[in-house]
Image (tube, coloured by chain):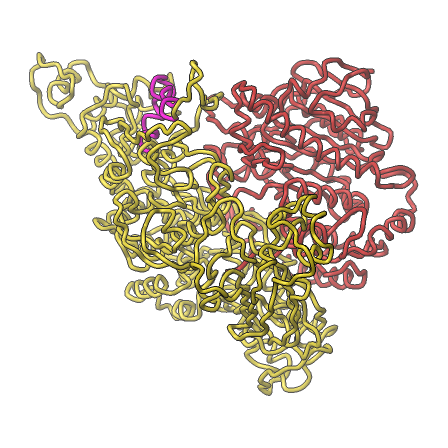
Amino acid sequence: MIFKKAIPRRTFLKGAGAAVALPLLDGMIPALATAADTVTKPVLRIGFVMVPNGIIMEKWTPATEGAGFEMTPILEPLAPFRDRLLVLTGLDSKQANAWPGEGGAYHTRASAAYLTGVHPKASDGRDMGAGISVDQIAAQELGKHAQLASLELALDPKQASGYCEGGFACAYLGTICWRTATTPLPMEDSPRVVFERLFGDSDTTDRSARLALVQENRSILDSIIQEVNSFRATLGPKDRAKFVEYLEAVRDIERRIQLAEEQASRELPTLERPAGSHPASYEEYAKLMFDLAVLAYQTDLTRVITFALAFERSSRAYREIGVPDSHHPLSHHRNDPTSIEKLVRLNTFHLKLFAYYVEKLRSTPDGDGSLLDHVMIHYGSGMSDGNLHMNENLPMLLVGGATGKLKGGRHVRFPVGTPTTNLYLTLLDIVGTPMEKLGDSNGKADLLSIA
Amino acid sequence: MSRRRMSNWAVAMLVALVPLQAANPQQSPSPVASPAAQYRQILSRYCVTCHNERLKTAELMLDKANLENVSAGAEVWEKVITKLRGNAMPPPGAPRPDQSFYESFPAYLETEIDRAAFARLNPGRPTAHRLNRAEYANAIHELLNLEIDAESLLPTDDTGYGFDNNGDVLSVSPTLLERYLSAARKISRMAIGDPALRASMEKYEVPYELKQDGRMSEALPLGSRGGAVIRHYFPADGEYVLRIRLSRTGDRANGDGGRIRGVNLRRHLDVRLDGARVQLFPVGGERFGKSTQAGAFGIGGLFQADPKQLEYETYGADAGLEVRFAATTGPHRVGISFLVEDRSEPEGVNTGTGGGSREPGVDSVVIRGPFDAKGLGESPSRRRIFVCYPSAGGESGSLVKRAALKTGDDEETCARKILSALARRAYRRPVTEQDVARLLGIYKQARSGGGFEEGIRVALQRILVGPKFLFRVEEDPSNLPAGSVYRISDVELASRLSFFLWSTIPDEELLSLAERGKLKDPVVLQQQVRRMLRDSRSAAFISNFFGQWLQLRRITELSPDVEEFPNFDENLRQAFQRETELFLESMVREDHPLKELLDADYTFVNERLAQHYGIPDVYGSSFRRVTVTDVNRRGLLGHGSILSLTSYPLRTSVVLRGVWLLTNILATPPPAPPANVPNLKERGEDGGIVSVRQQMEIHRKNPVCASCHLRMDPLGFALENFDAIGKWRNTEGSENTPIDSSGTLPDGTRIQGPGDLRKVLLAKSNQFATAVAERLFTYALGRGAEYYDQPFVRKIRRQAAPDYRWSSLILAVVKSEPFQMRRTLEP
């Protein structure tokens, strides 16, 4: 018998308080904040957090608009951050609706359209396609200044078996990030692997070790490019496309390597790489990943993080809050009050975990303020009423100061029929990577004028 | 495409001739019309009302479809064949043609299509195919004689057409390539040994829900209880420290909480390395004062216990379970178990609910090292890699002590030998001078900084991350015209074979036969296929093919509700998995006919599973073959694995089971459900409890639901006596409603219970065999079976008929045109 190796979160990573593996973490952070960067302008980061299967809207949507809105039961955990919070109502993801003749792949469409505003191609795998997602557009620009263009995290493993919603490959449900219209990005669910992506492959974050690694990788990658170019011409178009994808991946890593060399002067907190897989409870697991996300922003290893707290159609049970039912079937509540009450508890639980993240951002110093001052995090779901698979009037919100560009403390209601992509265009403007069109956008959402 | 328009007169003549159910007896007989015309008539009467160009029902338009030149419209006709062979159309409720039509028309279509297909072959073109995670790990093992934990190194792969070896969906993103780079580095270091090795730590956890009541493994001593067997890779000769933590009574999710289980009992913990004892620890049973309440660790317990005793019971008793021992480089087996003290206690299965065992258990083991490393010994992987060793120099680093055989080569000659050998196996073909030159370039660069072994290591890393290792590419010969069909080379065929049957690269025997052009010989090919099926590496085929086809991988995700099913534990989950694994292995290795998947009179159980199934007189934790005397339990449909993975955490699902059967056994998957299907109501209008059957009455009453559910539900109901974890039951629910496992199939047959269900499924053995042939085809080629592949699928089925033994099915796939040939690009 072989058992999985694991290290409990306790000994792996802890933001505050003693931890065996990280004697220097807390001590290094002030040095990090002041030493390396002489940039005085605070860096704006963007993030997206997604929850699936809809939200009970009657307990989410505040009754009034504008600044005087009252916190609803589900939003209650975010009460301490009210002044940094924008509740957004009335946005649609119409591209997630079924086209005539399309069957019941509701969650697949919701997942693919969520950050892209594009209706996915009905494909069992041969020719998947959606559109580029908003986080990846931001990453194209913001990624130039950070070692990682973006980071994709998830708490659900990618679906192991091929049994997914009819007509669509499982791969659509396993991610919400699309680097290009045909390249879905995997979302990492292993904390150890995330750690390695952030802090490299060596057992330690020591600088000379990192540099040696960097040079070794570079010569290997150059050799690969040469090899692929030597046989590419003889291949058919589909095969060639595979290798083009491969080469692009190689070049992407080379770019990172170059950045890493340039940023070699940057000191990183000394951490030991953990061997672990997943913590036992969902709450611990979520908090661990949130900790890693904060660390990634804090060390400026990336400026774009997308996090799926669960994938669309997630069947996770949340026993720890007294909801032993599988999430997806439960979300088809058919107006049964017991089911609805359980779902409200579930939705609130997710927000409680999100509030943990927001609090960590608030309490992490960054430049002359906190991380929360300098981020813009979007939280939402690809469905509003999960029971009816509604893709209109989605539950969404923004937290963070966005370096002064977001005025919080308001409930903004958009005109009926406003696509989510209009909001995304506004976010891209704020973050400094403007676009004229994204997916099904027909303008830009106005975040400022409603008082 | 020409169209035939029938005049009313001719139609009327045909009505008289063809034995239709509503023939008009007043027409006079006429000369025999062509089959095409006859079938056109039937289609017009029964199908075209929905499937026409105006309505476009299900995107199928039959009013203009060509019956004279069937093969030209093969794409459409293949859909018709599937539906008719599955008896699925017209939908229940609509008038149906005579039953003979369901055999004669598909046969007519198939004959036409197949004739054209074999006259003008289209074997397809699989796309360049990236190795998936399992194939990567197996290839590493085959190449370097090294076992790796692929799940921790690489992410899960995407699936397409139901399998994760589908060339089209296996893509390469930057993240994945990083993981490959990182994996290649780790693997090359492990394989060669790392001269800069520092002590590291690995932790192994025993699942909390796994009951440690009996002997846990064949590899543990007889007369032992509990514990675990760990396969650990020791990276160097030296000393290692092993530390054991015992199970607590508290839930691990809440941290350390709780008292050490069984701490009041005096026991002995045995630690062995490869079966030889390293240490025997006395543990438990010591007294420093008043004890905490057994099992209760609340505030009351705290105040009642003596502080020293409390400390002993929560931390002290396993604080000293640490031992230092010497080990050599390579993989070794560490066994940890408790000796059974009291022979009067009955051994084995404790299926008690709630408190569970009161005996101590092992929670986790940490292995640290190496300390005082004596050097990197000759591990199995080093022996594989270093086919030669330079006589002078070649050593670097402080930890190197080489027992390697020095063969008198100079460094570069030896490097060339080593890298050529590795590249040949890794790329699955004879190496070119270009390949070797490239690798030597990397070697030289790394050697200049780090020495001979470092040079080899980096070159190995380069092999493992390069395109010729990670991808299976088949190159068309350059001299062939566009759109032509050719036989793939022996070397390419060898790869297809080994990835099909072993999920890995070809071994030396297969590769060298291919290099010498011997695989072309059908006798040799058949011999190799049989050899490969007998070889233990075919376990990969069984695990990967069946695991995905039958969705067995979902067993690890099962989470039956703890209150509803308190008896479900990790032991049972593992038993479910093992039973089905052993059963499928026996099916393939012993070459049973296909129908025995459903009808076998044997299975494999251990004591735990036997108790679950109600099979008497089975003792002990090891699995053994037993005869299944209970007629309801026969075959796969009696396995806990299948029955659980087709259920929800809280209850069974007639629909899930029906869909599983339709999809996997009958290859007629139902379409997706419509929007807004609500949850089942558990209480009726009068507030009384409503049985699942009554709740599903709406499936029958509502015509929109009925079209699909009349096919699925009766199949699922037949299995209702098996609860959501596969246990037989005669009643359900708090009011002990008797289970009603009866149902009516769309054709009117009444069935009740698993026996009748099996009879119905076995009567459709041709359909089942076609389903299996298509799945095997998809898995073997790494691409979905398109409409133009159906003639080949049919041929595979025919060649394996009537028994459909696994060796016949597999051989038929290997001999098929798509497996042996390839089409060049169209102009």
Q: Which image quadrant for residue B196?
A: bottom right
Q: Number of marks in the image?
A: 0
The stretch drawn in magenta includes residue B652 = no
Counting from the top left corner in percent of width and height, residue B612 is at 38, 47
Q: Is residue B584 visible?
A: yes
Counting from the top left corner in percent of width and height, residue B791 is at 30, 43
Magenta stretch bounds: B692-715
Question: In the rendered image, which quarter contains the C terminus of chain A?
Answer: top right
Q: Considering the whole magenta stretch, tell me its main secondary structure.
A: helix
Hue of chain A? Answer: red
The stretch drawn in magenta includes residue B696 = yes
Counting from the top left corner in percent of width and height, residue B103 is at 20, 34
Hue of chain B? Answer: yellow
- Which one is nearer the viewer's eye here, B689 or A396? B689
Q: Which residue lies furthest to the left in this view?
A: B28
Q: Which image quadrant for residue B254?
A: top right
Q: Which image quadrant for residue B99?
A: top left
Tell me: B139 left or right of B80: right
Query: What residue do we see at 72% from left, 40% from top?
Result: A305
